[in-house]
Image (cartoon, rainbow, N blue to C red):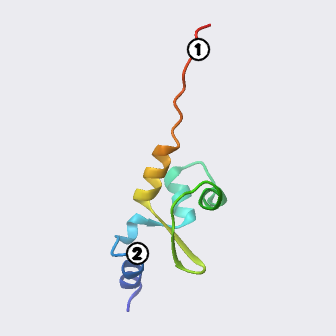
Amino acid sequence: MDKTKSVLTATGGQNPAEILTDETAAAYIGGIESRTVRSWRTCRGLPFLRITPKVIRIRRADLDKWLSRQQVAITRGVA
């Protein structure tokens, strides 16, 4: 089985371009390190796929949804 087919099988048929590593997720967001993405996975509930014990991937759609939930509304008090 070639690499693309194995990735598609492991990710439930998702397009491989929509499946990110910690490094590509960090680049997609911009301005952060891959270790920040790892921290978000372990400490802040960022959903991920465990393909094998050492292979972790993140669906781009899950990342986008998770990021939208992190949005903070800024309110200005009356001075």
Which quadrant is the C terminus positioned in?
top right
> In the image, is 60 to the left or to the right of 31?
left
**Disc 1 target residue:** 77
Q: Which residue is drawn at 44% across and 52% down?
A: 64
Q: Which residue lies furthest to the bottom in this view?
A: 1
Q: Which residue is drawn at 59% across and 48% down?
A: 31
Question: Looking at the image, which is closer to me, 13 or 20?
Answer: 13
**Disc 2 target residue:** 11
Residue type, numbered disc 2: Thr
Relative vertical location of residue 1 with respect to residue 46 in this rendering, above or below: below
Residue 35, x across and y down, in percent? 66, 60
Q: Residues within 10 Å of mark 1 (few under 14, many from 20)?
A: few
Q: How far is mark 1 from mark 2, CA to CA?
A: 46 Å
Q: Which of marks 1 and 2 is in front?
A: 1
> In the image, is 6 to the left or to the right of 69?
left
Residue 67, x across and y down, in percent? 49, 48
Residue type, numbered disc 1: Gly
Q: Which residue is drawn at 51% across and 61% down?
A: 47
Q: How many labels does the image show?
A: 2
Relative vertical location of residue 36 with respect to residue 14 in this rendering, above or below: above
Relative vertical location of residue 63 with respect to residue 12 in this rendering, above or below: above
